[in-house]
Amino acid sequence: AQTVTQSQPEMSVQEAETVTLSCTYDTSENNYYLFWYKQPPSRQMILVIRQEAYKQQNATENRFSVNFQKAAKSFSLKISDSQLGDTAMYFCAFMPAGNQFYFGTGTSLTVIP
Amino acid sequence: GAVVSQHPSWVICKSGTSVKIECRSLDFQATTMFWYRQFPKQSLMLMATSNEGSKATYEQGVEKDKFLINHASLTLSTLTVTSAHPEDSSFYICSASSSSGANVLTFGAGSRLTVL
């Protein structure tokens, strides 16, 4: 079974500081994709970052970067220089072959001014 | 980039009536669309996978006669909540994956349904 676990229901960070959100997953697949999606108060789901499992290099998108540890099945998200607009629910997602996505339970991040 | 339009964003209806929610991929073709339901402060729960030109695949526990899904074209999928009841009140989100194989889900903005 494919599962995605986010063990931090809520987190907070001071503006301009760095925060790391954790995510682990369980799969027997070798090829798959991992994602972090952001859901701000507007509830629009927005793709933050994407990682292909066959790539060893960690994905980065401006202030967002991941620490992908395939053997440990870990996929954490680091947000640097946190901004007030980063306040949102963050969902880790896993997609094996076949197009179906599996979402974690989410981490509610609050950036404190 | 890929855009998914979902309409209406907010709908209120009386118990017993039916409500249709539309999901359109605006600038790409989507052979597969997904419908999710989200309760407050919870994750997305996959309801069904909508396949263009064929019947939708429903997740276990989702009543296919209550939640009718039609995917008549490569750019449009609809979810109809039939004989709605207050317990159907929720936030419904659609998403689509481009047939070009980008392996990214693009989401609609969601539809908040309130059944009185």
Image: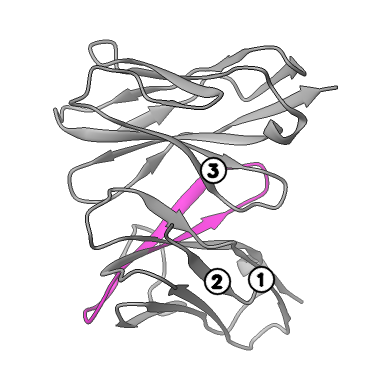
Q: Is residue A7 above or below residue B93?
A: above
**Chain designation of label 2:** B
Asked if residue A105 shows in the view, the reply is no
* Front label number (2 vs 3): 2
Under tag 2, what secondary structure? strand
A78 left or right, relative to A109: left
- Indicate whether residue A1 is drawn in magenta: no
Q: Which mark is residue B6?
A: 2
Residues marked 1 and 2 touching at CB (< 8 Å): yes
Amino acid type at circle 2 is Gln
User: Residue B9 bears which disc, if any?
Assistant: 1
Check contact, mark 1 vs mark 3: CB within 8 A: no
Q: Quadrant of residue B61?
A: bottom left
Whichever of labels 1 and 3 marks the residue nearer the N terminus, that label is 1
Where is residue B100 drawn, in percent x and y?
23, 59
Is A74 left, or right, of A87 in this rendering? left
Label 1, label 2: how far apart the Cα atoms are? 7 Å
